Image (cartoon, rainbow, N blue to C red):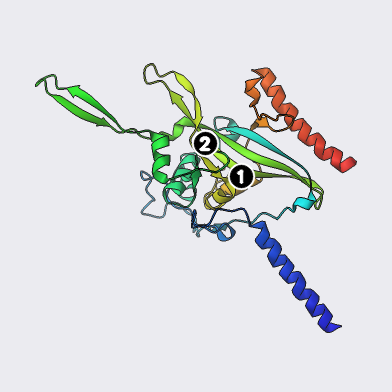
Amino acid sequence: MKRMIQLKTVMLASMFVSSVAVGQVGGPPAGTTPTDPAVAGGVAEIVKESYKPSLRKDGAIDKVEHNNYVVPWQNIREADVLYKKRVWREIDTRQRQNVCMRYPGDDESGGGMYIEILIDAIRKGNIVAFSDERFTIPLSPEDVMTKIAGKSDTNTVVDPVTGEEKQVITVRRFDPETITKFRIKEDWIFDKNEGRMKTRIIGIAPYQDRFSDVDGSFRGSVPLFWLYYPDARGVHVKYEVYNPDNDVYRITWDDYFEKRFFASYVIKSNINNPLQDDIKAFKKGVDALNASEEIKEKLFNKEHDLWVY
């Protein structure tokens, strides 16, 4: 009898370990990122070259290092999924609830804005950027820097005194203020094992505003790159989010996204949308906002129906 209990204990332990391992499947391919998502995290690093930490104790608190690590997602078995739909959302950093994404930064937030945290991670090779939302074409750090800042221009300038022609190279600089929106791709899944709807973010992309070189008029927003969100969690967990009320009680960027503290609106879904068109392709103005709210209501009603019936 005692031996039977021991065997059951060993089997349960092995099943738990295997389930944790399966829950971590789907991370970055081998050789793409050096960070293991299961143990990713650590202490915040400076992400902006112009930001310099204080050479003296800047504050009255005896602070310790803020070590934060990723809490792995629980595995969702396909057999437990009763319902799944994909939704695309847009986060506007100019909205009051999202203004923390424009916070210039301090020691615990890397000394930069949220987009600068991401770019620094790409530049250091801690995360891989992709050119498409299906994560099929990886971009090198050099490709990313070229996309966000543009290539250098060479112009011919005539010296007004000597009349000589000179080649002047104009180096373009990346302005983080031009990143005003982020698009996220997420799955809505009803897990019958837990009896609730789960939301898992799959990808995130910054959108940059582009302006005319002639008159400075706004020409539109374009995606710079896509990040596989499970890869980005190891970066998110190291840096803290600005808290407008209290600097002691801050959360990490991982908490910010996982607990959904951001404000957003739906721009697309695959609910009765086989061509996956954006809402703005067939709705304008207030009608587009109403269509966005209808998608949210459909997801809410689906969870309610699965609970009731």
166 sits to left or right of 277: left
Task: Check disc 2 and report its element: helix, strand or loop.
Answer: strand
Is any atom of residue 250 visible in this view? no
Q: Which marked residue is nearer to the observer: mark 2 or mark 1?
A: 2
Real-space Cα separation, disc 2 to disc 1, in angstroms = 16 Å
**Residue at x-position 41% and y-position 20%:** 212
Q: How far from the left and from the top, in percent, is residue 192?
A: 82, 49
Task: Check disc 1 and report its element: helix, strand or loop.
Answer: helix
Nearest the camera: 259 or 20? 20
**Residue at x-position 68% and y-position 23%:** 289
| Residue 57: quarter of image | bottom left
Furthest toward the right, the residue is: 309
Quadrant housing the C terminus: top right
Answer few, some or many: residues within 10 Å of disc 1's Cα (few below 14, many 20 plus, some between 14 and 19).
some
Residue 206, disc: 2
Q: Earlier in the sequence, mark 2 or mark 1?
A: 2
**Residue at x-position 74% and y-position 67%:** 15
179 sits to left or right of 157: right
Q: How far from the left and from the top, in percent, is residue 228?
A: 56, 46
Q: Which amino acid does label 1 sit on?
A: Tyr
Furthest toward the top, the residue is: 215
Q: What residue type is labelled 2?
A: Pro
6 sits to left or right of 183: right
How many numbered tags mark residues here?
2
Answer few, some or many: residues within 10 Å of disc 2's Cα (few below 14, many 20 plus, some between 14 and 19).
many
Nearest the camera: 214 or 251? 214
Q: Mark 1 points at which residue?
A: 256
